[in-house]
Image (cartoon, rainbow, N blue to C red):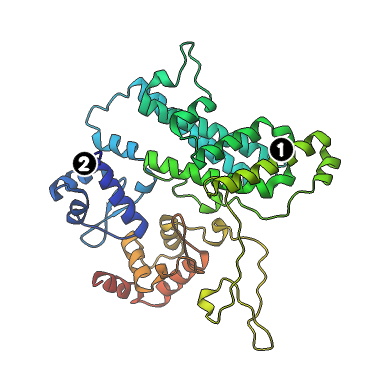
Amino acid sequence: MPRVDKRVLLLDFFREKEREGSSFTFQEAADKTGYSPKSVNKYISEKLKGKYIFKSESSGWVSEGCSQLSNDDFIRLMSQSTSAKVLTPNEKIYQKLIKRSLDAFTLALEVYNRPSLSNRVEAFAIMMVNSWELFLKAEILDSLGQEKVFYSNGKSISISDALPLRLQNNDPVKKNIETLIQLRDHATHLLIPELQPQLSRLFQANVLNYQERYKNQMGNSPLSGQSVGMLSLVIDGPEPEIGVIKESYGELTAKEVLNFLKQFEETSKDVDSDKYSISIDYKLKLSKKTDEADLTLSTGVDGQQAVIITTAKDLNATHPYTTNSAIEQINRDQSELKITSYSFQAVLFKHKIKANNNSEYHNYTDIHRYSAKFVNWFVNNLVKQKKWLNSAVDSYKKR
């Protein structure tokens, strides 16, 4: 079993503390990583303090921004001396491939989440295939060397050549990418709006597969600090009417669509994995325990009032503030007291704001997010109650 780099363990510790929004000591970091407290102190003081690690108001430290660092970025940062290390040609190519892959991935999501764009399904497929091709080439370069990526004439291998070098034939991830390539190659006939409900199941699996593989390779999420709503691509809808497609696009397209749907459903059943295609299931269960139910049915005048949901939540609209931006907004909205990361966490702790991961004040999916209502609540209490913040800090110290 390969030995884990202690610097990666240290980064994972910082990421965990950042997600929790809690402070730590040198001793706690040492216990988690195998470093001595003295070594942790030296690394923080010389390389991280003031940029990623900050002194809290208590005797501990807090981490900010480490979740957006990849393992390689952190290792390079920790390895820097007064004279910066010169990257090898392979390392430079590797970094460029990863960056271009991430750019293509992000652009694919941005395009797909733009409803006004008529060809967003086609653009998504093209960009995601490009993203996978670049990422797989980076993996091959890293593990097998440059000669496996580039031919003697300087041209690089295709994604079809790269796939078998990184994925087993029966791997659902490989089958998912191969289906996406098929869609790209037959874009004229298959990437039409009418197929979006079916294609979105394939797209969603593809995006989650990329996110997982990127995190395994780089250590951090490709969307660190951004809304997880960007990853939600699945939409439900009826099977497309072949007759309507034939009328709108012609007989050849209708034939291609029919063949694809048949092949897609057969492969989905054979593979039977959400890594190939996200399944959509509806299950109803009659139960007297409301806490076991996703849906509640009631009748009569005493029944529960129905709520009609017309659109999914956009976290950028409902909970637009990250921890840092919430603190900044609170300080802009009042001049009574300067709110720091420590005092902010103290209020969260005292009032159990993080106890619910999806409330009107707080949401946690990819990162901790806060609503404008929470910011207003914080400011109002701060201004109207003189001892409100001190009480929270005292409780936090005694936790």
The residue where tag 1 is placed is 190
- Along the horizontal axis of the image, is 24 left or right of 199? left
- Taking the view exactly as shown, the residue that stands out farthest to the right is 247
Give the position of the C terminus as an image quadrant.
bottom left
Identify whether 398 is placed above or below 91: below
Q: Amino acid at mark 1?
A: Leu
Q: From the top left corner, tell me how far across and down residue 123 is, in percent.
A: 64, 37
Q: Nearer the viewer, mark 1 or mark 2?
A: 1
Q: From the top left corner, tell me how far across and down residue 48 is, in percent.
A: 27, 44
Identify whether 192 is placed above or below 62: above
Q: Amino acid at mark 2?
A: Glu
- Along the horizontal axis of the image, is 130 left or right of 324? right
Give the position of the N terminus as an image quadrant.
top left
Q: Nearer the viewer, residue 240 or 364?
A: 240
Q: Which mark is residue 46?
A: 2
Name which quarter of the figure residue 345 lies in: bottom left
- Along the horizontal axis of the image, is 291 left or right of 71? right
Q: From the top left corner, tell me how far across and down residue 275 is, in percent.
A: 52, 46
Identify whether 97 is placed above or below 232: above
Name which quarter of the figure residue 190 lies in: top right
Residue at 39% x, 42% y is: 216
